[in-house]
Image (spheres, rainbow, N blue to C red):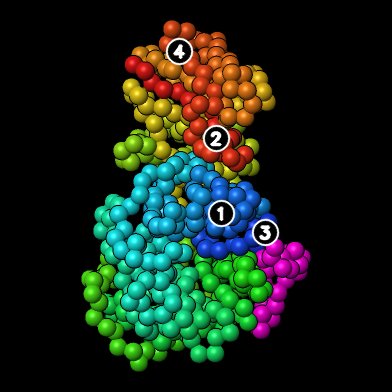
């Protein structure tokens, strides 16, 4: 158990600068919480170790969890993300682009990096990326994607390094291709541990945690500025006094220009909490950088040129740009919604139309409306339509307040499948439940009446709990309920075929409630 964790949630910690710190309310547990990464949309991902809900149980070294901020700025209860996790050690690296999350995974004695694609609130596995040189590291790698998705900074131990754990950089060279990691050299890496890298490309500033510097009592957050084109040429690192304490701090992530979250270990059990300031404060980041006396050594692999780093002004979904000067920032006005509607398979933009709904009644608002205006008008749902594509639905709460709202559309072509994620049933029955269920099926009916050549198979699925024969029967009855509703709205019975699979075709692990909930579903497949 993590000593004193309950007390950490009950009161604040004061730094030497009399600024109050707190453990994230609802996000921490009597377990080890590390590797926080902000991915926008009020969402923070992190690694939680040894929790009984982890896919590997209490012995699992780390699954990915999530906590979100509400409209009052309060952090909600942490939620397990089995769709991003394994029975090994899983580290969220951050967003490669607005659609793609990278996860670093150490499992069965090896480390690898994987892409996941965002669809609504879910993440779907894409593929493993090509990342040469990972096999040379000892287990326990961590890291962070740089905003813009073209660089990854890693921390790990390998033969030929400077100290125990060093920081390395790798550049993206293709859709799934990266260069072999390059050691950042002796200015950054000392004889002990350097971990938790975060690089801001706008200011060419590296934030990382080190126990190698003079006077270290644990690991402190250091800040250094990149000088010139070489990744081994840096200013002398400066300690970020505002955050450093007698314990160990690591893995800084920027929520905004006045808000940061980091990992802090204050107790001798070695377990970590996620920390932040009680109230947003001006960040007193070191800005007076002096040249280092260490000369950059020639690199055995090619240096990643700084002109390959994209401007962060074009990215919308990773860590906030880092302020180096303490200037008062004006309150930014709310910006209208912007859209990126794409073919889910080809990842290309497609034309679309937007219909706003209050319950099941259409209401007129511009596509680029303010979310506050929609909420004030009690708008609940948005329907996204595109010719020859299944309609998609999002709740107003799923729309992005900053950056583009990304919608992946499934083309209604032979073999394509779509999940009816908003179709619900009363527990243990085939009775349709909820206004959103009826709205979704009503809109599907209209789509099928407009596209009269489409023949659909409606497949019902359950989790694997209970009697398999009863599960198969229930899944068939639920598919039949969906068909009955569509037929009652004018769709020809002959165009709708049904199947009931019970729990035989899971799409997630049945070992967790989140996984079982994913497996209880209705899917549509185009058969003609």
Q: Nearer the viewer, mark 4 or mark 1?
A: 1
Marks 3 and 2, how far apart at CA: 25 Å
Check contact, mark 3 vs mark 2: CB within 8 A: no
Is 369 a magenta residue?
Answer: no
Q: Which residue is mark 4?
A: 496
Is 188 on the left or on the right of 211, as rendered?
A: left
Q: Earlier in the sequence, mark 3 or mark 1?
A: 3
Foreground of the two, 404 or 353 = 404
Q: Secondary structure at mark 2?
A: helix
Question: How far apart, in angstroms, are the residues tagged by discs 3 and 1?
Answer: 15 Å
Task: State the residue position of label 3.
Answer: 29
Distance of mark 4 from mark 2, alpha carbons?
A: 23 Å
Can residue 474 be spotted in the picture? no
Task: Determine whether the residue tagged by mark 3 lies in a helix, strand or loop.
Answer: loop
- Residue 178: which disc? none
User: Residue 493 in the image: x percent, y percent?
Assistant: 47, 7
Residue shown at 50%/76% (left/top)? 209
Please state the extent of the stretch shown in magenta in the rendering. 1-23
Check disc 1 and report its element: helix, strand or loop: loop
Mark 2 lies on residue:
518
Closer to the chain start, of discs 4 and 1, is: 1
């Amino acid at each position: 158990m993590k000593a004193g964790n309950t007390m950490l949630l009950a009161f604040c910690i004061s730094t030497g600068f009399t600024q109050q710190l707190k453990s994230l309310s609802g996000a921490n547990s009597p377990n080890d919480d590390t590797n926080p990464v902000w991915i926008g949309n009020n969402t923070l991902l992190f690694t939680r170790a040894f929790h009984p809900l982890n896919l590997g149980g209490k012995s699992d070294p780390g699954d990915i969890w999530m906590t979100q901020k509400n409209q009052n700025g309060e952090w909600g209860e942490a939620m397990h993300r089995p769709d991003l996790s394994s029975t090994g050690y899983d580290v969220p690296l951050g967003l490669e682009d607005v659609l793609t999350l990278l996860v670093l995974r150490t499992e069965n004695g090896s480390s690898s990096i994987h892409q996941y694609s965002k669809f609504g609130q879910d993440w779907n596995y894409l593929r493993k990326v090509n990342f040469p040189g990972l096999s040379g590291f000892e287990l326990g790698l961590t890291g962070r994607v740089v905003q813009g998705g073209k660089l990854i900074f890693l921390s790990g131990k390998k033969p030929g390094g400077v100290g125990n754990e060093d920081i390395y950089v790798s550049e993206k060279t293709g859709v799934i291709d990266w260069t072999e990691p390059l050691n950042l050299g002796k200015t950054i890496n000392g004889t002990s541990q350097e971990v938790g890298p975060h690089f801001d490309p706008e200011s060419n500033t590296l934030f990382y945690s080190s126990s190698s510097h003079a006077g270290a009592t644990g690991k402190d957050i250091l800040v250094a500025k990149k000088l010139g084109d070489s990744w081994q040429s840096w200013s002398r690192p400066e300690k970020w006094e505002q955050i450093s304490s007698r314990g160990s701090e690591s893995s800084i992530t920027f929520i905004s220009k006045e808000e940061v979250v980091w990992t802090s270990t204050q107790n001798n059990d070695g377990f970590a909490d996620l920390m932040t300031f009680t109230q947003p404060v001006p960040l007193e980041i070191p800005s007076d950088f002096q040249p280092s006396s260490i000369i950059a050594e020639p690199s055995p692999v090619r240096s990643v040129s700084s002109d390959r780093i994209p401007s962060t002004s074009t990215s919308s979904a990773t860590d906030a740009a880092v302020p180096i000067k303490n200037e008062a920032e004006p309150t930014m006005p709310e910006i209208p919604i912007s859209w990126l509607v794409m073919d889910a398979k080809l990842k290309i933009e497609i034309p679309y139309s937007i219909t706003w709904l209050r319950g099941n009644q259409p209401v007129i608002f511009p596509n680029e409306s303010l979310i506050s205006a929609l909420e004030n008008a009690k708008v609940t749902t948005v329907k996204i339509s595109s010719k020859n594509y299944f309609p998609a639905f999002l709740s107003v709460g799923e729309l992005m307040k900053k950056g583009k709202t990304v919608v992946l559309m499934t083309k209604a072509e032979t073999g394509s499948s779509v999940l009816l994620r908003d179709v619900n049933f009363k527990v243990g029955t085939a009775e349709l439940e909820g206004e959103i269920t009826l709205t979704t099926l009503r809109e599907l009916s209209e789509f099928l009446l407009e596209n009269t050549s489409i023949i659909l198979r409606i497949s019902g699925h359950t989790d694997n709990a209970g009697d398999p024969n009863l599960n198969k029967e229930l899944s068939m009855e639920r598919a039949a309920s969906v068909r009955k509703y569509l037929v009652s709205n004018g769709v020809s019975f002959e165009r709708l075929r049904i199947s009931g699979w019970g729990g035989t075709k899971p799409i997630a692990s049945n070992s967790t409630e989140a996984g079982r909930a994913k497996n209880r579903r209705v899917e549509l497949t185009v058969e003609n």
